[in-house]
Amino acid sequence: MAPARPAASDPVHPTRAIRAYRGVMDASSLSILDRRITDCRACPRLVSWREEVARGKRAAFADWTYWGRPVPGFGPADARLLIVGLAPAAHGGNRTGRMFTGDRSGDVLYKALHDVGLASQPTSSHVGDGLELYGVRVTAPVHCAPPANKPTPGERDTCRPWLVQELRLLRPTLRAVVVLGRFGWQAALPAFAEAGWPVPRPRPAFAHGARYLLDDLELFGCFHVSQRNTFTGRLTPVMLRDVLRTAARAAGLDPADEV
């Protein structure tokens, strides 16, 4: 049985939010930023949920020690392509401690990245499984697993400084971004603007296959790799590979040919 869900109205504690923001400003490299992220406790509802899930576990993972903390981005510090999702899954990233690891959405994403030559292997189950990404980093606008996979607007906004600083640190090499889903798109655009890219007004609309140029950065929209999309055929492996391959070429990477 899943753990009880915290009330959606739990507020973000301002002192914790300020402490988290100071942690962002102290992060002068991605490795430091990742460590700061894993210590964040700014959003009480998310802290309560992620830790309760880590204690309650799921029967299939009863022998696992869950991560139960915010999940940092994954990939090299000189990435040319960034993939932005939504948030870690309760029994995926919240269990393994690595973004998009250990759930079916991650299975779809990493298989596609491997198919186009951007990942060393097609599967990803835990931090020490040997997976490497080539020129690609994976992150999310919300770093804690949210109840029902739905962060509140306040939680999204409180987490934004982490993404802003990640973008700033990646800027010297970053040339393209694939955003998965409408929520990620709406959360990421303000972060791009705050990180210094010229985001037009009105802001570009999300659509699968959307492509916009923000100065030196190409922005791509893609349906999220959720089971809802992949099981219904709204997002097929071919569609996902096409977006990743196009974005990789825009980033100056050399993706594999059609598979």
Image (spheres, rainbow, N blue to C red):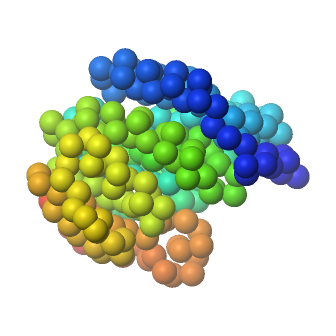
- 146 vs 203: above or below: above
The x and y percentages for residue 251 are: 16, 53
The x and y percentages for residue 63 are: 78, 35
The x and y percentages for residue 22 are: 44, 21
Q: Is residue 253 left or right of residue 237?
A: left
Q: Is residue 1 left or right of residue 217?
A: right
Which residue extends farthest bottom?
233
Q: Which residue is drawn at 25% across and 35% down?
A: 168
Residue 24, quarter of picture: top left
Q: Which residue is drawn at 39% across and 61% down?
A: 185
How many numbered callouts?
A: 0
The x and y percentages for residue 141 are: 45, 47
| Nearer to us in this view, 247 or 166 | 166
- 157 vs 181: above or below: above
Q: Which residue is drawn at 44% across and 77% down?
A: 236
Quadrant holding the C terminus:
bottom left
| Nearer to us in this view, 103 or 111 | 103
Q: Residue at x 54, y 59 (%)?
A: 105
Q: Is residue 95 visible?
A: no
- 179 vs 43: above or below: below
Q: Is residue 141 visible?
A: yes
Residue 226, quarter of picture: bottom right
